[in-house]
Image (cartoon, grey):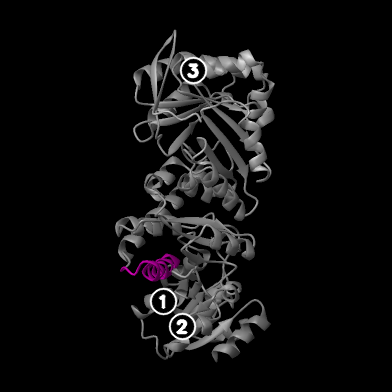
Amino acid sequence: MSRRLFDMRTSPSSPSRYIPLRLPRVCVAVIGTDAADMFARAESLIRDNLFVEFRLDYLRQPSSAFPRLRKFLETHADVLAVATCRRAVNGGKFRGSASAQAAILVKAANCGCHFVDLEIQSVSALKPAELEKVRRAAALIISSHDFRATRKIDETFARMKAFPAEYYKIVTTAQNLYDNVMMMRFLEHNRDKESVIGLCMGEQGVISRVLGVRAGSAFTFASAGPGEETAPGQVTARELNDTYRIDRVDAATRVYGVAGDPIAQSLSPAMVNMAFRRENVNAVYVGLHAKDLRDLMNCVRDIPINGLSVTMPYKEQIVDLLDNTDALTTKVGACNTVIRAQDGKLYGYNTDVAGVVLPLEQRIHVKDAKVLVIGAGGAARAAVFGLKERGAEVFIINRSTAAGQKLARQAKAKFLNRTAVRKMQFDVIINATPVGMSNGHGAAPLNANELNTKWVMDMVYIPAETPLTKMARAKGIQVISGSEMFVQQGARQFEIWTGKPAPADDMQKVVQTALQARTEAAAAGKKK
């Protein structure tokens, strides 16, 4: 077993280097267009991140980095550095031979790098003397990368262990959520035998980058910033540290998440993790890109996950897979909140109702108000049943007439066609469809001449201003933004999961700040 309290390495041209037994949780990959750019980027990172990986294969001439690498590590003695020069045949950018790769890593170690990362394919190709030279130069990380799937992890690990190393890194690609479970089981099984690093790439593998350290990964990898990813699904260092508080994730940390398809743009992780931090709850909230509901449920039961926010398209489908639901959820026929009880059973709730009703009750008398709901899916069902319970006169319009009429019958509401909408006057019009979302669901669910109402409420919250809300403001109609509904339903979820009052005002601030940042980034992108 290759563990030590610390590792002191020396070379003729470098000072002694100590490698602590407990490394920082996050190693930040640093890239650059040239050596000057790479080390300028590193300088900007080390105030918050003392563990960095220099991806020398991103440089046209990796050897051009050595003078700056030596000076950087001599100047910053507290920095821990990994040198990587991954070959193109193994997913990197270096087009030289395994021997040339090994020579570069030895020189990087002589410049002060504490670790070198060498793929198992290169390790196998090197002559014993070449490999031993690498091992003498720095702590060796033997790595394996599968850019297609998560498979044969144990076989790969057995092959890697034939070669002595300080760390063994296995990186796979998650094709589904359950692949993360497989990776975490591998880590849990081997964490006390060898120093292992494990994670899954891809959007569905993001949870392994957060929870892998909980399962036994020595550390995980992060990008320096957006657009600087060195692997699919890589999360930024700021997000891992600030949003997920990865340094505090431990065996007692409870796991929650948002599940849907898609969920990449969701602000739920930023909002809920802030609430956990503010209320001192030992929990972490992650995104679960579920392309299949059964896959999601298997993942939920086996990680295990303590609670879920359920979004499109599973709010109705998930009801039949839960052990029980409250009366409101049963009546609505849609669930957006799941909690795991102490006995392991999954219970469903619907907080979308509160998300719709509370903002309206702060502005109008809901009883006897004439409300038009656009849509017939899970979010629309919550709006329709919630408003009916409070005495509103509810009307429904939907692209699919059959689905709209069915909801109207179930809720004792009225179904309208587009012609009727243009002739009527409403107190509120609510968009409960994804139309208007920034990922391309169309312009607006209604035309300007159909907005005969005092208020418009759009459940879409990304972008902050949708085509519908812009159209409403242009007509002088008062608007309730989707972010308000989003925060209110999230606050109720937090209270169900934790039993604590939600810091709703702070949650709203986090969402507004994030939306503003996205708006500014989008505007900057258009200027380019």
Is disc 3 in contact with disc 2, using a CB cutoff of under 8 Å?
A: no
Q: Circle 3: is it few (<14), some (14-19), or many (20+) Cα within 10 Å?
A: many
- Sequence order check: which comes first, mark 1 or mark 2? 1
Q: Amino acid at mark 1?
A: Ala
Q: Nearer the viewer, mark 3 or mark 2?
A: 3
Q: Amino acid at mark 2?
A: Gly
* Magenta stretch bounds: 482-501
Q: Is residue 293 left or right of residue 391?
A: right
How far is mark 3 from mark 2, CA to CA?
Answer: 64 Å
- Secondary structure of the residue carrying numbered label 2: helix
Q: Is residue 145 in sight in this rendering? A: no
Label 1 sits on residue: 354
- Secondary structure of the residue carrying numbered label 3: helix
* The disc label shown at residue 260, or none: none
Occupied quadrant, residue 156: top right
Q: Nearer the viewer, mark 1 or mark 3?
A: 3
Rendered position, 472 above or below 178: below
Rendered position, 465 above or below 129: below
Label 2 sits on residue: 386
Q: Is residue 215 in sight in this rendering? A: yes
Q: Is residue 233 left or right of residue 342?
A: right
- Secondary structure of the residue carrying numbered label 1: helix
- Sequence order check: which comes first, mark 1 or mark 3? 3
How far is mark 1 from mark 3, CA to CA?
Answer: 58 Å
Which residue is depicted at the point 56% across and 35% down? 169
* The disc label shown at residue 109, or none: 3
Occupied quadrant, residue 290: bottom right
Q: Nearer the viewer, residue 245 or 57?
A: 245
Is disc 1 in contact with disc 2, using a CB cutoff of under 8 Å?
A: yes
